Amino acid sequence: MAPTPGTRDDQLADLDLPVLCYHRVVPKTQAQASSTIHVTCAALDRQLRQLRRRGMTPVTFADLVGAGALPKRPVMLTFDDGYRDNHEHLLPLLEKHDARAVVFALGDRKLTSNHWDRATDMPQATLMNDAELKACVASGRIEIGSHGLTHRRLRDLDDAALDEELRASKTNLEALSGQTVLTFAYPWGEWRERERAAVARAGYRFAVATDHGRSFSEDRLAISRRIMFPHTTSFGFYKKTSRWYPAYRRLFGRTA
């Protein structure tokens, strides 16, 4: 069904929204792992300062479904996995810069670390506990989304297990946070039409992939995100938050 002109859905249909993908926020670069995805506190501080200079305003998915006016130049900061350093380092930076973000946490609250990375050289890191996650929500700076129940590869699950992974995570996180969980982040950014359909069945309004997703205006259940790396420079960040970045990627195939 086409959006009705003048409605909120009509506004979203034409929305130019860069969605950024982060993971950990750490005091210094984690040099021991070749594949680690993090930013330093200093780098994120510079990035938030740059957004403000350029008149860009961080928004959350709740803003997109709310009744308030959207900013002229919205941008979205998302953080996968729900690491403890998001509470320790991200939250103070959001407060410093009067910004907000979305953190995708796991619905199985017994999990305490990134167990899915044990077969790699990625450092083990502690996830937020319930009290830390609730403190993030209470701050008004962080919206919680789902990253699945246990961070399993969705393609490996049969249909019943897939539905349970999506629905139980949403239910658990809503009970803990007191928020409606609007959004799902596909683990490893992997999705196919089967998984996309299951996300819709589970009641999510949005879902995010990584750089193999689609534009926000094209598909709100497979939204492309622009990944932030330790080596992302200030100019690289400028590129990834610019309107012309998708065309640049199509032309050059670059993500850095």
Image: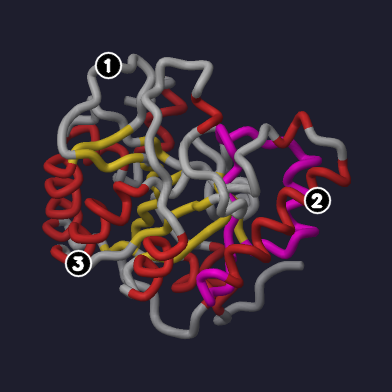
Give amino acid for label 1.
Gln
Q: Do the residues labelled 2 and 3 touch (CB within 8 Å)?
A: no
Left or right: 243 as drawn, with respect to 113: left
Q: Which colour scheme is used?
A: secondary structure
Q: Viewer-nearest of labels 1 and 2?
A: 1
Identify the residue at image location x=32%, y=36%. Answer: 228
Identify the residue at image location x=73%, y=46%. Answer: 196
Give the vertical position of 1 relative to 90 (above or below).
below
Identify the residue at image location x=72%, y=64%. Answer: 203
Give amino acid for label 3.
Glu
Of the pair 200 and 148, the residue shown nearer to us: 148
Give the vertical position of 139 relative to 67 (above or below).
above
Callout 1: helix, strand or loop?
loop
Looking at marks 1 and 3 on the same chain, the residue that comes earlier in the sequence is marked by 1
Callout 3: helix, strand or loop?
helix
Callout 2: helix, strand or loop?
helix
Residue 63, position as x, y percentages in the image:
44, 73
Q: Is residue 143 among the parts visible in the rendering?
A: yes
Identify the residue at image location x=12%, y=46%. Answer: 46
Segment tinted magenta in the rendering: 176-205
Report the Cα–Cα distance between label 1 and label 3: 30 Å
Give amino acid for label 2.
Asp
Which residue is denoted by mark 3 in the rendering? 95
Of the pair 146 and 129, the residue shown nearer to us: 129
Which mark is on residue 163?
2
